[in-house]
Image (cartoon, grey):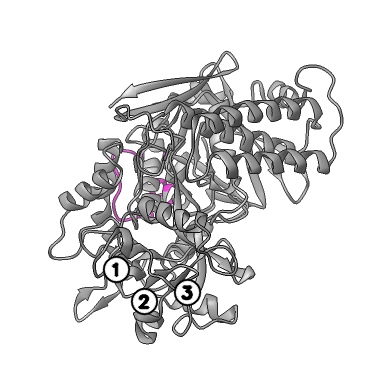
Amino acid sequence: MNVLIIGTGLTGMMAAAQMKGLLASRNRNAGRMEDEIQIELVGDGAGASPFVHGFNIPLDERDSVETFLEDTMRGGYGLSEPELAQKLCRGSLELLPDLEKLGISLEKKDGKYVLLQPLGSSWPRVAGSGNHTGAEILNRLTGLLKSREDVRFTTQARVLRLDVRDGCLKGAVLWDRRNRRLEYRSASCALIACGGFCGIYPFSTNPADSGGDGIGMAYDAGVPLIDMEFVQFEPSVALYPETLRGKSVITTMFYEGALLQNGKGERFMQRLHPGEHPECVSKDVLSRTIYEEIRKGNTTPHGGVWFDATGVGKEKLGKSYGSYVERYRRAGMDISQEPFEIAPGPHTSLGGIAVETDMSTAVPGIYAAGEAAGGIHGANRIGGNAGLETLVFGKLAGEGMLRFLNGKSVSAMADTKSGEKAFMEMLEEPCGGKRKTAGEDTLSGIRKEMQEILQKDLYLERDAEGLEAACRRLEMLSEALKETAEPQSYERLRLENDLTCALALAASARARTGSVGCHVRSDDSGEDWHYHVFLQKKDGSMTVRKEKI
């Protein structure tokens, strides 16, 4: 039995570890065929996982799972799927024995956990093992998994298509970067854990290995998408120095004495949110306020605002935010002595693949977890929940896939090779007749235009005219790509996925005519927004439906 895990970040690693019994907590009834399962993890990077500073766990004596859940639901404007939100919050405490088994200790001082307070939380809640929590967990999991003969890592490779026939997953097609060729993998089930899609924007916090592949291949396979319009813009993304452009800065510093100023030196947040900590509002509100200040022209030399962390103090910065201090030190700046320039940027995609509580999708054998999955955070994510979902839902995906495999008969999994050749030939065929040969200039031109559309019409503020134009132009680009790109090009397949993702984002944003959370319409219709927007491929076209919560 072959299991394909698409992504080599924390989500995929946790799923693999759960399937192989390497974590403390697991479903004891799930492992009848455990020893027969061969896992392959495929990816060309770890995404944002190495940069996870910490994650939410309600460990403060004043905190509770119930308060955590209330914050999560309120932060998402009531649009989080309740069962998924409950799984996330309750699953946080279950991570403690897992971390202990991995040999990772959360930071304590005087016998109490050291916790940071993220935006949107009632109490300090972000726990970690220092400044490199994500990297530490990732390294431990990688070491454990690489020591097993039944786990294989395929690096410098990227899964680009899923093979679904007769309503079930049969396998997937990946691009091998070393050999520069497409390869087929048979699989009884697959987990899409390749991160979010903010990398399709021209300026974002996402690393280069992220993009729209997870969304594109799921949609193409007939899996429904949910709430694709919700893109969370991180308020504080580095603009300068150039070497740090696109790197996010953790917003818990605002509770520690950091503040924002515009290019005139004015503390502009006080105009709207007077008080001791005017910057301590939800991320969507903070991003919009900074964006408005930039649009007024009250900017720093490179077009942003000042993030002044000097009030945090050199000692506190060094202890709690040492990775940021070092990052700027290497760029020639001392953030304990001088402010730096930031602006909002696409950071987390909140919408994505529609999943059940076991991370399964509508297509048997296809699972999704981490930022690739949607419906968890609703219309806005509170700080600290992004890192948490990789761990909690990675585990749940591992459990879900074990149950799925235990429920399948051996005969149902025997003929996995059937149809492989036909699928590869279909993938390589020209679409819509004879295909013109495309060079890299043509593909880069289409990508550039796609990014211009995203930046102009699908940024922090949207309207009907812009969204209509965006949908129309993205559809035209998709058709142009079909007619001009060479069939076996890695660049073409990636661009197809990213265009599919961009079109889904635009179509979903067009369907939601009211403003809510991080989806802001300047022409807000004022209609009730208590519904989800679903998209699915049917008869070759994108269908959109609204489902009341």
Main SS, magenta region, reads loop
Q: Which mark is residue 320?
A: 2
Front residue (pair 233, 190) = 233
Q: Residue furthest left?
A: 62
Query: Would you place residue 303 above or below residue 36 in this image?
Result: below
Of the residues shown, which amino acid type is indicated by label 2?
Ser
* Image mark for residue 324: 3
Q: Front-most of 143 and 490?
A: 490
Q: Secondary structure at mark 3?
A: helix
Q: Check disc 1 and report the residue beneath it.
A: 116
Disc sitting over residue 464 in the figure: none
Does the image show residue 279? Answer: no
Residue 426 sits above or below residue 87 on the image: above
Task: Please state the horizontal and vertical placement of residue 158, each as a whole percent of the image.
Answer: 64, 44
Q: Are marks 2 and 1 in contact (CB under 8 Å)?
A: yes
The local crowd at label 1, few if under 14, some if 14 to 19, many if 20 or more residues have their Cα within 10 Å, is many
Residue drawn at the location 81% of the way across and 29% of the way down: 484
**Residue occupying the far top of the picture:** 539
- Judge from the rendering whether residue 239 lies leftward or rightward of residue 58; answer left or right: right
Residue at x 24% of width, y 67% of height: 275
The span picked out in magenta is 15-33
Task: Mark 2 or mark 1: name the one nearer the start of the chain.
Answer: 1
Q: Amino acid at mark 3?
A: Tyr
Q: Position of residue 417 (x, y in %)?
A: 64, 26
